[in-house]
Image: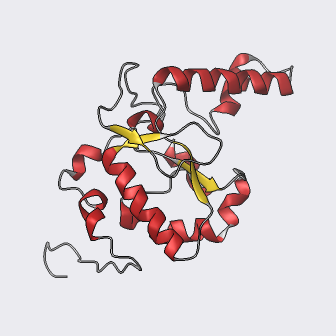
Amino acid sequence: VTGSEEPVYELIFINDLSEYEKYMNPEDRDGYLTLVNLTNSLDQTYTPSDLVDCTYTAQGRNTQQLRLYANKALEALMKEMQAAGFYNMMVLSGFRSYSYQNMLFNQYTQNEMAANPSLTVEQAEQIVLTYSMRPGTSEHQTGLAVDMDTMGTFSTDFAYTAEYAWLQENAWKFGFVLRFPADKTDITT
């Protein structure tokens, strides 16, 4: 690379993913870059207009939804992951409306207070903020975020699995990033 040229990466896949290329690397890439966090929130009425059902929703869960391009990129990721020998990854959570996130956050707060009755609401909310976001501040409301895990385990041990290692190495090829790694929580909230 010389001057101001961007490096060119050759991506090698096991499958022919040509039908997914426009989803994995959309022309309007900036249209999918949305910063949502504690200081950059979404309005309670925000709902993406292009939500579709997610084929890879975990069994026993309500069918999850994602924005069309994210869902197609996820399909490509899952096909490639399965071709690499990993068949047990599923989506636990996709799009969440403001009201659903509000219900979850309140339920989690109540669960923390039930587990430790000495906590104040504020203390319980601070604990909840280590694993869930307030309504309007969750990336799930964008329809671009998914919680994934090996089927049925959903635990912190996921970070020590071969599936997680594969995702760390390959998720970017499909337009995804792994959010909130344990050693980066001070800069990812």
Q: Split into 4 quadrants, where in the image is the N terminus? A: bottom left
Relative to 89, 178 lies left or right: left
**Of 161 and 77, which appears nearest the observer?**
77
Residue appearing at x 66%, y 61% in the figure? 159
Relative to 102, 115 lies left or right: right
**Of 150 and 186, which appears nearest the observer?**
150
**Of 67 and 34, which appears nearest the observer?**
67
Relative to 167, 74 lies left or right: left
**Of 134 and 118, which appears nearest the observer?**
134
Q: Residue 101, image x and y in percent? A: 54, 26
Residue appearing at x 64%, y 38% in the figure? 130
Q: Residue 93, image x and y in percent? A: 55, 41
Residue appearing at x 60%, y 48% in the figure? 58
* Numbered marks: total: 0
Q: Residue 115, image x and y in percent? A: 85, 27
Q: Residue 72, image x and y in percent? A: 35, 54
- Choose top left, top right, bottom left or bottom right for residue 119: top right
Can residue 9 be seen?
Answer: yes
Would you place residue 162 above or below residue 47 in this image? below
Would you place residue 127 above or below residue 155 in this image? above
Residue appearing at x 64%, y 71% in the figure? 162
Can residue 171 be seen?
Answer: no
- Choose top left, top right, bottom left or bottom right for residue 17: bottom left
